[in-house]
């Protein structure tokens, strides 16, 4: 249950509030922000604890690398069933990002690999700086993705490109990654966080019913049978446009008080 008390986070994470934007920082640069269990559970606590004042979130990282993926030290000591439970824990936590209360922007740099790409893929908008590179080294380590990549990465780049990354160890740099859909933005080195915050502030200024529809409804509609998808789209569209908020925003435009799409 969200409360005004900030959640207790492990030392590998830091949270701060910037206006309506909640910022989560991966703070384990000495291990390239490798994700151990306490960090995954801390990410869950952060998203569970977002209060009603939060309208958007940013995930960023300290150091040169966004995230080196699963902490390989913890992997050695898991048996098969524990492995299933561990993977399901990642699924649960990353679903709280993807289908959580607010849109999430990820600020990427350096390595976005393995579980790091899985984490980034759960966000709604990815901003990569020019140092960013993507890889799925699971193929080289003799393992498989387990944090949702087999579902989310093909949505971004297709099965064939993901298979190539895993089979051949192919890396994509920031520009090629953006071209195939791994990020929506590429910015100069060191600029990802600032741009992510700008975008998050813009998102936070949207109508909450629109952000809700984009986060909760859009991915489900896109994957639904089209017959159900069109109906769900109609229901959500009607719900959004019948709010006082939407009526006010449309009147603002018609009466010359709101920006045009050419203004940005
Ligand atoms: C780690 C990890 C890690 C770094 N688990 N400790 N992910 C990988 O296979 C990627 C592994 N990492 C790398 O390829 C490189 O570390 C990087 C390209 C990300 C960065 O290179 P570099 O030269 O800047 O750093 P480094 O010297 O390799 O690493 C610095 C330290 O971080 C070092 O520890 P130290 O105690 O010797 O200083 C590394 O051991 C440690 N480190 N990455 C543990 N991943 C739910 S399924 C998901 C499956 C996966 O994610 S598999 C992919 C795992």
Image (cartoon, grey):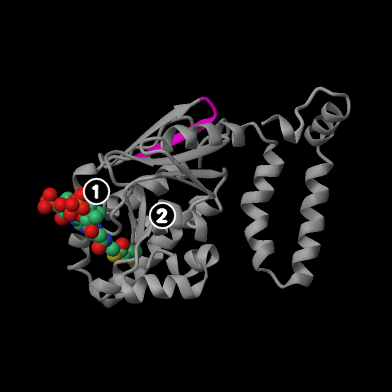
Q: Is residue 113 above or below residue 250?
A: below
Residue at which label 2 appears: 119
Majority secondary structure of magenta residues: strand
Write down the region rendered in magenta: 19-25
Residue 20: x percent and y percent?
A: 55, 29
Pinpoint residue 111: horizontal percent, then vertical percent. Answer: 31, 52
Q: Which residue has dot 1 on it?
A: 32
Within 8 Å: ligand 1 and the Cβ of disc 1? yes
Where residue 94 sits, quadrant-wise, is: bottom left
Q: Secondary structure at mark 2?
A: helix
Q: Nearer the viewer, residue 99 or 164?
A: 164
**In this picture, residue 8 sits left or right of residue 141:** right
Distance between mark 2 and mark 1 Cα atoms: 14 Å
Quarter in which the C terminus is drawn: top right
In this rendering, the label closer to the viewer, 2 or 1: 1
The residue depicted at 47 percent of the width and 64 percent of the height is 153
The correct choice, above or below, for 85 with respect to 23 in the image is: below
Lower position in the chain sequence, tag 2 or tag 1: 1
């Amino acid at each position: 249950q969200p409360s005004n008390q900030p959640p207790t986070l492990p030392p590998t994470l830091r949270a701060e509030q910037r206006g309506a934007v909640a910022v989560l920082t991966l703070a384990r640069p000495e291990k390239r922000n490798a994700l151990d269990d306490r960090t995954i559970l801390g990410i869950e606590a952060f998203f569970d604890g977002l209060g009603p004042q939060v309208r958007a979130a940013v995930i960023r990282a300290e150091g040169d690398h966004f995230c080196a993926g699963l902490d390989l030290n913890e992997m050695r000591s898991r048996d098969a069933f524990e492995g299933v439970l561990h993977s399901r824990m990642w699924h649960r936590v990353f679903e709280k990002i993807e289908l959580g209360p607010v849109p999430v922007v990820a600020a990427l740099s350096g390595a976005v690999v393995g579980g790091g790409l899985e984490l980034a893929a759960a966000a709604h908008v990815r901003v990569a700086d020019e140092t960013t590179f993507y890889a799925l080294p699971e193929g080289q380590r003799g393992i498989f993705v387990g944090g949702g990549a087999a579902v989310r990465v093909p949505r971004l780049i297709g099965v064939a490109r993901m298979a190539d990354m895993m089979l051949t160890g192919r890396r994509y740099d920031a520009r090629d990654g953006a071209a195939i859909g791994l990020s929506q933005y590429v910015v100069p080195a060191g600029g990802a966080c600032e741009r992510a915050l700008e975008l998050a502030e813009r998102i936070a200024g949207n109508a909450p019913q629109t952000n809700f529809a984009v986060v909760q409804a859009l991915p489900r509609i896109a994957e639904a049978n089209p017959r159900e998808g069109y109906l769900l789209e109609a229901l959500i569209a009607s719900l959004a446009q019948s709010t006082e908020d939407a009526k006010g925003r449309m009147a603002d435009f018609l009466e010359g008080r709101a920006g045009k799409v050419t203004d940005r």
